[in-house]
Image (tube, rainbow, N blue to C red):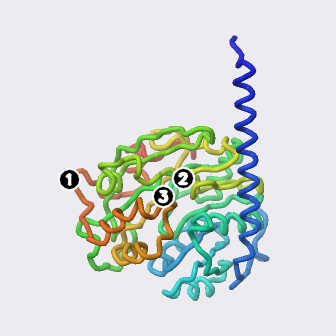
Amino acid sequence: MNRPGRPVLLRRAWSAGRLRWKRRKLIWRAIRAGRVLTPVADRTAAIRPGDILLFTTLRNEMQRLPEFLAHYRQLGVRHVLAVDNASTDGSAEFLRAQPDVSLWSTPASYREARFGLDWMGMLLLRHGHGHWCVCADADELLVYPHCDSHDLRALTAHLDARGIPGMGALMLDLYPRGPLDQPSGGGSVTEELPFFDAGPYPCQVMQPRRNRWVQGGVRQRVFFADRPQRAPTLNKLPLIRWHWRYAYVNSTHSMLPPRLNDLYDGPGDPRLSGVLLHSKFLPGIVERSREELGRRQHFADPDAYAGYHRALTEAPVLWHPGSLRYRDWRQLAELGLMGGTGWTD
């Protein structure tokens, strides 16, 4: 059996040391982020051992919040910890009135806080250790095999029994049949946005963190066909039994330590996984895109994505003959977009 030579071992040790240093730096950033967060409604004293927690950062999400909270409550989330980034649409007032929500606010730069990760990292560090934690944006609704009959408590008990510290998910963009500026019908997310692309969703493994990079779907097809390498990353790790030594690196797309990135290989992975139903394209996206052209808060290189936001302001039609109408988690499992359907057996 061939063993790695000394140069290879030294490179591995150097890389591992750099990643440990990066993880410590991210944790320190999270600690410092607490300085800019003002508690609005701190009800964390009500959190009990074993409670499943939901963490989110948001700005002007009143359109989504009622369904977002109802969805995760139904899945068994017991407490929500949210950071509001200077909303002006009543989001903060709505959240403050919810008895199972703890709320912090900040007017600080979303982009400079690593797109809210530093704020969420502080809350995870302070309140998430030892809990199963869902980390999701307000436009992401998690579904998984048998979610209509088995809640997150059952799911996490299954993962605990097998020593699995988390579950990955594909972020699946939903969209309407017509142009993006069509008026709202007032229905649920899947009624307003009933269509999605079944694929392709290729996955790459990136070194040295071993993070996965899944791309494809409607945004690549419509907005990045000529530069697919710029298409959004669609794999996420939204459900983790949190430890204070963990850190998200790039949204919830990747984590440190690197072994956590091995939890999910994207669509086609037979292991238990989920799908985040992504409601980015609800009515209002056209105006939000116009705003983002000025705010420049959602990408590390805003100029590179200015064309994407300009295209959204033109209210394109995303539907095409290959679009599928969303039905339920069974459909997604049949398409290979989530795995592990036998976990309840």
- In screen coordinates, is 329 left or right of 17? left
Nearer to us: label 2 or label 1:
2
Neighbourhood count class around disc 3 (C-alpha, 10 Å): few under 14, some 14–19, many 20 upward: many
- Identify the secondary structure beneath mark 2: strand
Neighbourhood count class around disc 1 (C-alpha, 10 Å): few under 14, some 14–19, many 20 upward: few
Q: Which residue is mark 1?
A: 321
Q: Does residue 341 appear anywhere in the picture?
A: no
| Quarter where residue 46 is shown | bottom right
- In screen coordinates, is 91 left or right of 127? left
* Disc 1 residue type (three-letter): Pro
Nearer to us: label 3 or label 2:
2
- Which residue shows up at 55% across the image and 52% down it? 253
Give yes or no for contact between labels 3 and 2 (Cβ–Cβ under 8 Å): yes
Q: Position of residue 223 (x, y in %)?
A: 32, 57
- Which residue shows up at 65% across the image and 45% down it? 260
- Seen in the picture, residue 74 relative to 37 is either above or below; the reply is above
Q: Position of residue 79 (x, y in %)?
A: 67, 72
- Seen in the picture, residue 174 relative to 97 is either above or below; the reply is above
Q: Which residue is mark 3?
A: 276
Q: Quick one: 341 or 141, which is closer to the camera?
A: 141
